[in-house]
Image (spheres, rainbow, N blue to C red):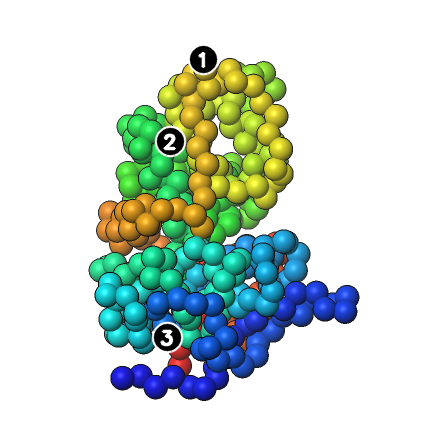
Amino acid sequence: MTTLPETFHAFRIRGEIEGAWRAGVEPVSLDELSPGEVVIRAAWSSVNYKDALAGSGKGRILRQFPLIGGIDVAGTVVSSESPDFAPGDAVLVTGCGQSETRDGGYAHFVRAEAGSVIPLPEGLSLREAMILGTAGFTAALALLRMERLGQRPEHGPIVVTGASGGVGMLGIDILTRAGYEAHAITGKIEHLDFLTALGARQVISREKLHWGQRPLEPTHWAGALDGVGGEMLEGLTRVIQPRGCIASYGMAGGTELHTTVMPFILRAVSLVGVSASTAPRDDREAVWSRLAGAWRPAHLEKIATREVTLDQLQDVFSDLLAGRAFGRTLVRLAG
């Protein structure tokens, strides 16, 4: 039986105190953590854009303070009040309110609700699960939802916007593994060779997009994974093939959408929303099964470009928000 230390380190976000944002590494005890049936010895976490917004105070992510940051975690069960898990089980948690309404994964020990814990699927290590993390889960959930609406590889290429980001990179790899022809749109054309190596058959500079302003323009793609929103999403609605699907999972380029109903009525285009943090358990299990199997990205180690400790998180957040980050950053918690 594992004996837990009285205190352990965690990256705790306290919010704004006396006009200054307070967040950093501090000792915590298990009793201070959000309630849950499963205690996990954390091995790895990851850094997502949402983590950077939460940890830096640049976005209104947390619903209460203080909370431990980190929307992802993978590790080994220490104790469980749920019959579904036993000490020694390898598990992961992504989203499910972590670093939003409850303490998250930036800690050496995590307490989670049993319903949010997923057994590590055979075919993935704990580290690989966190290279994927919420980013890979989001891309795969988007594809799952598209396929439920009839999207198939033989219909034509799928375009990925924001392709130089974590979801975009993993999306290209996942699409390729699933048998699709993936195209990439990026604002960082210097990453052309990297995106091509991941499987992108075409890489298009965002600055060179010219797809017209009419409600219906000549079609370019059978579907799209979009994490940009705003004008990018507006443009996509005009150029997707009949019966194609656009999966919307982000709004980095804006929250407003100015379009017409014509693509949805005259071309039967579907626009489907993707919420990784609130996905039901059945979908979570289905997605992780695919990520460990037929959709398992072929370039995980290539996409994982940085490893850090809790003490280095603030620097990572600054780089990510300033557009200096590239690839996936892992947070090493064990050892």
Q: CA distance from mark 3 to mark 1?
A: 53 Å
Left or right, 60 with respect to 46, comes to right
The answer to whether residue 221 shows anywhere in this view is: no
Q: Residue at x 40, y 33 (%)?
A: 158
Toward the right, the furthest residue is 19
Q: Specify the amino acid type for callout 2.
A: Pro
Which quadrant is the N terminus positioned in?
bottom left
Q: Image quadrant for the C terminus?
A: bottom left
For mark 3, does the 10 Å Cα neighbourhood hold few (<14), some (14 to 19), or many (20 or more) residues? Answer: many
Q: Is residue 228 visible?
A: yes
Q: SS for tag 2?
A: loop
Residues marked 1 and 2 touching at CB (< 8 Å)? no
Q: Is residue 296 left or right of residue 196?
A: left
Residue 321 placed where, x, y %?
62, 56
Kindly indicate the quadrant of the structure image that contains residue 209. Answer: top right
Disc 2 crowd, CA 10 A, few/some/many (<14, 14-19, 20+): many
Q: Measuring 31% from the left and 65% from the top, which residue is drawn there?
A: 91
Give the CA distance from mark 1 to mark 2.
Answer: 21 Å
Q: Nearer the viewer, mark 3 or mark 2?
A: 3
Q: Residue 184: percent from the left, percent from the top?
A: 46, 39
Q: Amino acid at mark 3?
A: Arg
The secondary element bearing badge 3 is classed as strand
Q: Name above or below for residue 255 compared with residue 212.
A: below
* Residue identifier under label 1: 266
Mark number displayed over residue 41: 3
The three-letter code of the residue at mark 1 reads: Leu
Give coordinates of residue 202: x percent, y percent. 44, 36
The residue wearing badge 2 is 157
Tell which circle, 3 or 2, labels the residue nearer the N-terminal end. Answer: 3
Q: Is residue 129 left or right of residue 258?
A: left
